[in-house]
Image (cartoon, rainbow, N blue to C red):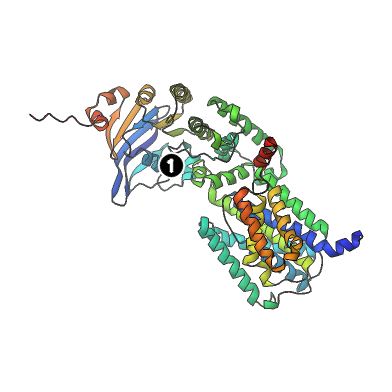
Amino acid sequence: MPELLNLTGMSLEFGGVRALDQVSLSVHTGQIYGLIGPNGAGKTSLFNLITGLYRPSQGEIRFKGDSLLGIAPQHIAQRGIARTFQNIRLFAEMTLIDNVMVGMHTHLAYRFWDLLLRSRPFRHAEVQARKQALTLLERVGLSPYAHALAGTLSYGNQRKLEIARALAMQPQLLLLDEPVAGMNPTEKNDIQDLIRSLRAQHLSVLLIEHDMRFVMGLCDALTVLDFGRVIAQGSPQAIQENPAVIAAYLGEEVPHAE
Amino acid sequence: MNWADWWATYSTLVLSVGVYGMMALSISLTLSCGLLTLANAAFMGIGAYVSAIATTTFDLPFSEALLLGTLGSTCVALLIGLPVLRLSGVYLAMATLGFGEVVRILLLNLDITGGPLGLNGIPSLTQWWHVLAALLGTVFLLQCLRLSRIGRAFEAIREDETAARLMGISTHPLKLLAFVTGASIAGLAGGLNAHYTFTLSPGNFGFENAVDILTMAVLGGIRGLPGPLLGGAIITLLPEVLRDLQEYRMAANGLILILVVLFLPQGLWDLPRIRGWFKRA
């Protein structure tokens, strides 16, 4: 499998605080890659680095072989990286279908004069986009609410809409930041199935999640972060047995005082 | 009173309803991207002065004068917009307000603009159908934008600019587009305005006018195109309706604005809320 995303020696500093310290990982095409670790380990910071919101103090990010350093967030998105947010960032006062169609912005290739003349390419592109948006909403189970405002959705449904909006960008790499937080077990299963179906379409997924059952059942490979450092990397099986990981999550065993 | 008399008395008012409808639409364009800019009065002033100088000093035909006025404000907006739109929120409002003052003071001190006396004896060339055509053209343009990817991108930028950028939207060019298009509309409105008021003075396009234009859009609401038109008509007609209040007119204006912001935060044209009232009734 070819390498899609490669991070080498990424460090990020806020003032004197090291949020990330020499993090390296690589995601292959068609892989579901998990990023786990306790709160404050630097997982979301890593997403912000990849999507261009933060600049690393050290290290290199390569996507399809090209460096992403110094590229503006919108151009990174145009290259094929889409993401969702831990603290949901939908366009709350827009309808569901419009939210998804914003995701298609860069793929709606009509010119300014097409739009003014309401020419055939314009109408065709808009009608197609609307259809695709409805299909995507159907895929995440939200088509009944297509014309409701995004802000009126329940928490779990807002997360689903974020995924639909990100998929509308037709990305090659999808970054999901806690996609099932606040969802019930049935919804979690639905999302798991959805992510598996994305893998079947050769889409790569990098996801942050605290639900261990979800992560272990879904991911092909994992990286565990703690205090900004990689403490373990490997298959779900290997991670579950890794003493450093167990220590980070459960605390270290203190020998009993004699 | 017959039709001709009525028109002789009220034509200025009727034309102003149309022109200020355009002004309210022009500021609603930047508001719809979440940008609070207060330069629209200044762009109107540039359009008015440029086209008035074109017809009086250079004897150009009205159509060319209007075109020059529109182009003038468009070009200035491009130059100002490039640096200023890097700002946001209150800072953007302050920068555009500052620009408005610069324009006013230039108009006040230049020779070609007639200094503090302004321009007088501008030919009365604006016909009612000029204003109507310009207004309909503006509505058509904005409606086309609203129903396209550009309109959706504007809304997305207003809702969450960072999220919009992460959707691959280049926000800076789009903000510039909104700002410059708004300035073009304001420039055209200014040119039309100059040719039915006969005189122009620098004070017409200062802070008070900038706030009036903002008030129109906020009062009407920016969720649809009828909102700014409604707001523009109300604020233009209000001084006539409240003529008996004389110097308390401005206070009444302010009071109305406070009431609207408190009870109709989305403005008068707020369809979901209006539907809600009917459902309850």
What residue is shown at x 18% (from left), y 29% (from top)?
A253
User: Where is the N terminus of chain B found, in terms of image quarters?
Assistant: bottom right
Q: Identify the residue at the far right of this view.
A: B2
Quick check: can you spot residue A210?
yes
The percent position of residue B170, horizontal first and vertical second, equals 53, 47
Residue A42 versus residue A209 in the image, above or below:
below
Q: Is residue B177 visible?
A: no
Q: Amino acid at mark 1?
A: Thr
Q: Quadrant of the C terminus of chain B?
A: top right
Q: Is residue A75 above or below residue B254?
A: above
Dot 1 falls on which chain? A
Q: Position of residue A160 (x, y in %)?
A: 50, 30
Q: Residue furthest left?
A: A258
- SS at badge 1: loop
- Provide residue A31's location: percent of width, then percent of height: 40, 27
- How packed mark 1 is, by other alpha carbons closer than 10 Å (few <14, some 14-19, many 20 or more), is many
Decide which of A139, A211 is in the foreground and name it.
A211
Query: Measured from the top left, where is residue B123 in percent x and y?
Result: 81, 70
Q: Nearer the viewer, residue A183 or A198?
A: A183
Instruction: Please determine whether, in this image, residue A94 is positioned above or below residue A250.
Output: below
- Res. A50 image quadrant: top left
The answer to which quarter of the image holds residue B68 is: bottom right
Residue at image x 28%, y 26%?
A: A239
Residue drawn 69% across the image and 53% down it: B231
How many numbered circles are shown? Answer: 1
In screen coordinates, is A231 left or right of B263? left
Q: Residue at x 38, y 39 (%)?
A: A44
Residue corresponding to mark 1: A51
